Structure formats: C-alpha cells, structure tokens
Image (cartoon, grey):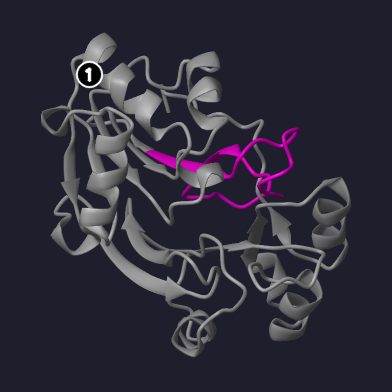
Amino acid sequence: MKKNKSLNFIGNGACFNTDFGNTSAYYIDNKTHSLLLIDCGETVFERMMKHQLLERIKNIDILITHMHTDHIGSLPSLLFFCEYAKGVIPTVIYPEKSTMNQYLSLVGNEPQAYKLISPDECEKYRIQSVKQEHSKFINAYGYVLELGGRRIYYSGDTKTISKPILEAFRKGEFDDFYQDVSRYDTPAHMNIETLSKLFNKAERHKITCMHFDDEITRRKAECLGFDISRVNEYINLER
C-alpha cells in the first residue's frame, strides 16, 4: 500500500531525462486555493498548463532550490502567465534574493509582477534552508518544510546528506524525505549505491527518490527498497 505523501510531482527526471520531465514537486492547500511549487525547470510550465494545475489557484508560491535551468528554466514564463493571464502576484522564495532578482530582470520579468523573499521571511510556510553540495559555480539548497502539519525534507540536488539531517531522520523528525539520486558517481548528485549504504533495508521505504537519470535508475531505486516519486498522480483539486 502506498503511503500518503505531502508532495505531488510534475516531473521526476534529471537534467537530460526529457522523458521524465524536470524534477518539480508541489503542494496545494485546497482551503485557500494556494499552490506551493518547488522548482520550475524548462518542462514544468508546459506540464502545469497541460494538466490545468493553475486553473483554480489563487495564491502561488515558488520555492527554488538552485539556478540550474532544469530547476528554474520556465520560471519566467510562469511569472508572465501569472501577471497577464491570471492577474496574480506570485511569491518567489530563494535564499539569494539579489541573484534571483538579477536573473528575473535579465529575462524581462518586471519587479512589480512578483514578490521576492528569502525562506526566513516566509510567513505562510515554515521553511529552513539547507546548504547542499552540488556545484562549484552556484549555490544549491535543500529545504526542511512544514506543510499541512507534516515535516518534510526536500534535498534538491546534492551529492551528500548532512549529519544533522541524517540524525533528524533517525529520530523520526520527518514525515516525508525526498532525495535526488543517480546511478553514476558524480560530484553533483547522490549515488544510489551510496544512499543504500546510508540507510538500512528497514529504513529505505521511508525515502522517496527523485531526479532519475533514466528508467534504469528508477528501477534500481525500487529494487533497493526505496520509494519513488511518481508523476502520473496529479492532485485531485476537490480532495
């Protein structure tokens, strides 16, 4: 039986895995018609439109893990859509506000069309940023979030899991734990074999893997006993 998850997924692929789509997760609060979107890569806006994910949404918050295009590539299009088609001012959440502001200015998003805050400034959700090991050229962040009474760890892209996060997991402090994986040994992502050594067989079903290189990576994660993110379970807005 599949356990209840805090997040749904629009895509769960790595950068070059166009079949699975860019990894992006979301949470909807049906009482307030609010959407929290985590990352908005190149394929994300198109998929959101295809599945009418924004149809009844009145409030939009977008949490970004880092500035690689498979995590931010269609954010400008989403902001333009919110401005011109929905008449909504979304909130973009990112620890480095000046970097994000510069990027959005370069692609033509006008500053009055969105609100930009850091995770510490977010009042709607409790969000704690976690500095990750991913790239030598840009910073990357994971997040500890509290959504709908559940505490979540969302890794973003990272090669490692920090000691405090591992300790919190083993103390039972997370209801959901989302981790990017790769079958390759790279300096940018968590190797699936390394992940299997960090968690014993009894723990692995509590870890939801995402950001798959390909079908082989997804199947390997399942064979090792990990849960996997799924993109075909779009949320029922009437739930």
Q: Residue at x 51, y 60 (%)?
A: 156
Is residue 201 visible in this depiction of the protein? Answer: no
Residue sitting nearer the eye, 29 or 217:
217
Q: Please say if 102 is above or below 110.
A: below
Residue sitting nearer the eye, 175 or 13:
13
Label the magenta part by its dominant secondary structure: loop
Q: Please say if 83 is above or below 192.
A: above
Query: In screen coordinates, is 148 left or right of 235?
Result: left
Mark 1 lies on residue: 83
- 12 in magenta: yes
Identify the element where label 1 is drawn. helix
Amino acid at circle 1:
Glu
Q: Residue at x 58, y 45 (%)?
A: 23
Residue range corresponding to the magenta coloring: 1-27
Is residue 33 visible in this depiction of the protein? Answer: yes
Q: Please say if 72 is above or below 121.
A: above
Q: Residue at x 40, y 41 (%)?
A: 27
- Residue farthest along the front direction in this orientation: 106
Q: Quadrant of residue 58?
A: top left
Query: In screen coordinates, is 173 left or right of 9?
Result: left
- Horizontal and vertical percent for residue 178? 56, 61
Q: Quadrant of the C terminus?
A: top left
Please tell me how many numbered marks the rendered image carries.
1
